[in-house]
């Protein structure tokens, strides 16, 4: 039998076939991945580039990290998902280590980031409707007495919002994903325009504005959902005190705090989680991207004690939830973050990278923002947008992208070295200072 190909042979072919057969909802830059190793990648023609986007932060360990790859392959050779009709022997270990890593109570695993956000919304809404000290059945416990006791220990207060009226406060300029409910929580017209009727129940406030947040809270408010740094929104860092202030306001009004750390979490911003900069522990923490290590598709709504018992049978589920191969990669990623101190590394190298970017003193740059190894370089708006600069950076050897119109985003793998950052800085300097 004739040997069949498992990938296309040239960049040109890949681009043409992609555009012919895949619905074009993105406009990718014209680089085709054919091989990856750490922070370096190659196209089919053997051209080498530096990875400085990391699949929107999903590749904290870089490409094909041995520890993650070994875990993934090891499990792929044992058995494949058996569905949530049965238990498996990998997901519980991953869940235990994740819950301990986060200092939370329980986790609801799922696959994509947007699905994690959906789960957080479900938990928050049900909590709003059923969180009364005496509604045992809503908490998923065997007995009303046990549930009431637990609820009391968890500090639940009466909420009892009438069914179907819950409101969740979200921020202008957010990005939480692309499902219908999640785009309903977006202020971006281009994500929502043709997809109505949208899901009701979201109230918008400006990002970074604590006064607006407190003013927007009504008796129907169940949660405040936000990113500690808006990644897709242009690497927008809120004012100092915002995270802690949001925590306090939510606490004061008995409203859940939900941080979407899908992009900012798991070491990316120089702490395990970006909210740790202000000790603003959430009631629900949403994770994704690097949670699956790169090869795995794992996201999660990680629950504090307060909401850990809210959802129960048969209120949620998905075929590939707790997928053992994905969970094996996720477990390896969690251990890698701790063993190699990736958060501490991102903190140090992030400061080094920031200083290097500032030292370029480019007259084209308006602002350099970000924490850890998530950086946004906003260009002056009269330059007409970041896209041509990104194209030049890619040509010169650095894969990155623009987020929002005017900002170049850099999010290298957390295993990048100082020397590699120096090399990247030399390219950035060239692109931002030479015509
Ligand atoms: C903060 C944030 N939330 C949610 C998502 C959506 O994740 P996914 O694309 O896996 O659905 C993203 C993706 O970029 C994100 O950055």
Image: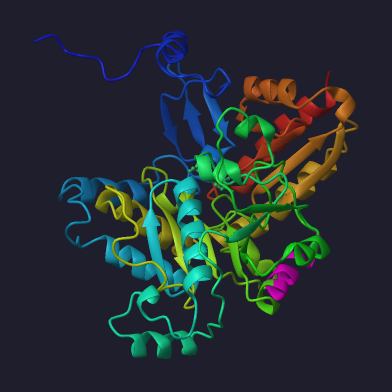
Question: Which residue is pictured at 71% across the width and 75% down the height?
Answer: 248
**Residue 105 left/right relative to 380:** left
Residue 372 figure quarter: bottom right
Secondary structure predominantly adopted by residues drawn in magenta: helix
Indicate yes or no whether the magenta region holds residue 244. yes
The stretch of residues the image draws in magenta is 239-249
Q: Is residue 278 above or below residue 180?
A: below
Question: Which residue is pictured at 74% across the width and 24% down the height?
Answer: 389
Residue 98 drawn at (x, y percent): 41, 66
Question: Which residue is pictured at 39% across the width and 76% down the height?
Answer: 139
Residue that protrudes farthest toward the front in the picture: 162
Question: Which residue is pictured at 55% across the width and 37% down the height?
Answer: 197
In front here: 281 or 274? Answer: 281
**Residue 354 left/right relative to 49:** right
Ligand 1 quarter of the rendering: top right
Residue 285 drawn at (x, y percent): 53, 63
Residue 137 seen anywhere in this rendered image of the structure = yes
Residue 400 seen anywhere in this rendered image of the structure = no
């Amino acid at each position: 039998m004739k040997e069949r190909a498992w990938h296309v042979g040239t960049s040109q072919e890949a681009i043409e076939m992609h555009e012919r057969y895949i619905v074009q909802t993105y406009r990718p830059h014209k680089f085709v991945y054919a091989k990856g190793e750490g922070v370096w990648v190659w196209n089919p023609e053997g051209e080498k580039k530096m990875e400085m986007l990391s699949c929107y932060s999903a590749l904290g360990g870089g490409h094909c990290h041995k520890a993650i790859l070994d875990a993934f392959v090891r499990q792929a050779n044992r058995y494949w998902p058996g569905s949530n009709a049965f238990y498996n022997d990998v997901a519980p270990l991953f869940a235990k280590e994740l819950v301990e890593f986060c200092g939370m109570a329980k986790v609801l695993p799922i696959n994509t980031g947007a699905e994690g956000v959906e789960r957080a919304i479900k938990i928050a809404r049900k909590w709003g409707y059923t969180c009364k000290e005496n509604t045992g059945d809503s908490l998923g416990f065997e007995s009303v007495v046990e549930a009431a006791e637990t609820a009391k220990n968890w500090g639940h207060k009466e909420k009892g919002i009438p069914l179907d009226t819950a409101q969740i406060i979200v921020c202008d300029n957010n990005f939480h994903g692309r499902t219908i409910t999640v785009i309903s929580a977006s202020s971006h017209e281009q994500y929502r325009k043709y997809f109505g009727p949208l899901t009701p129940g979201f109230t918008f406030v400006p990002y970074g504005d604590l006064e607006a947040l407190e003013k927007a809270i009504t008796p129907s408010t169940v949660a405040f959902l936000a990113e500690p740094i808006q990644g897709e929104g242009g690497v927008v860092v809120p004012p100092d005190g915002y995270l802690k202030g949001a925590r306090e306001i939510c606490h004061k009004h008995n409203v859940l705090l939900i941080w979407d750390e899908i992009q900012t979490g798991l070491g990316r911003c120089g702490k395990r989680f970006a909210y740790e900069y202000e000790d603003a522990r959430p009631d629900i923490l949403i994770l994704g991207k690097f949670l699956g290590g790169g090869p795995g598709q794992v996201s999660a709504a990680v629950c504090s004690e307060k909401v850990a018992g809210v959802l129960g049978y048969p209120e949620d589920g998905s075929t590939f939830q707790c997928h053992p191969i994905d969970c094996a990669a996720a477990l390896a990623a969690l251990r890698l973050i701790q063993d190699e101190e990736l958060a501490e590394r991102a903190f140090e190298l992030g400061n080094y990278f920031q200083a290097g970017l500032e030292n370029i003193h480019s007259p084209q740059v308006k602002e350099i923002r970000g924490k850890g190894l998530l950086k946004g370089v906003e260009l002056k708006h009269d330059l007409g947008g970041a896209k041509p600069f990104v194209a030049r950076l890619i040509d010169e050897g650095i894969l990155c992208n623009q987020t929002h119109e005017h900002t170049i985003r850099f999010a290298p793998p957390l295993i990048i070295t100082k020397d590699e950052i120096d090399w990247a800085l030399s390219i950035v300097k060239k692109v931002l200072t030479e015509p």
